[in-house]
Amino acid sequence: MPPSLPDDSALQPAERALAEARAAQADTFAPRSVDASRRRIATARDILFTAARARRPLTDSEQSRVDQLVAAAQLDARSALVETQARAVQTKLEDLQGQTGANPASSPSPQPRSTTGVSP
């Protein structure tokens, strides 16, 4: 008799977060965070399948570990998404500065204002 398949619905929040990050091309811009999320999901899935192969429910410690892995995988995926979005904003800003000829490195820094009315 083949082992029963585990209920892996607990992984869905992390898998959705990872899919969202990957849809935003996080594989390109934040590969380490994407890989960390994948590894955590895979580890959680392994715990689920190990219990299913043994035809037993998860122990409390296994359930706790799966929950922790899923939460961490979600954070990794969100981090990848944020890194990717930040890179996109930076690229767009550079494009806009290039179009206007502005170069933030060459523009003078603003001088502090005197609160006494006397120039520094």
Image (spheres, rainbow, N blue to C red):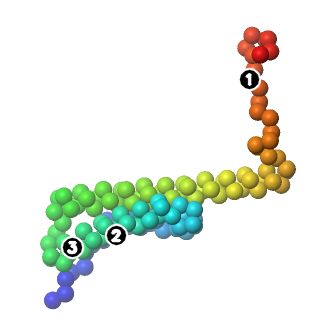
Q: Which mark is residue 100?
A: none
Tell me if 21 is positioned left or right of 101 in this view: left
Quarter of the image with the N terminus is bottom left
Q: Where residue 42 sits: x, y (%)?
A: 34, 69
Q: Residue at x 41, y 62 (%)?
A: 36
Alpha carbon distance from label 2 to label 1:
53 Å
Q: Quadrant of residue 60?
A: bottom left
Name the kind of residue labelled 2 in the image.
Answer: Ala
Q: Which residue is mark 3?
A: 50
Badge 2 element: helix
> Is residue 13 in view?
no
Q: Residues within 10 Å of mark 1 (few under 14, many from 20)?
A: few
Q: Which residue is outermost to the front?
A: 106
Q: Are marks 3 and 2 in contact (CB under 8 Å)?
A: no
Q: Earlier in the sequence, mark 2 or mark 1?
A: 2
Alpha carbon distance from label 3 to label 1:
64 Å
Name the kind of residue labelled 3 in the image.
Answer: Thr
Q: Earlier in the sequence, mark 3 or mark 2?
A: 2
Q: Residue at x 54, y 54 (%)?
A: 82
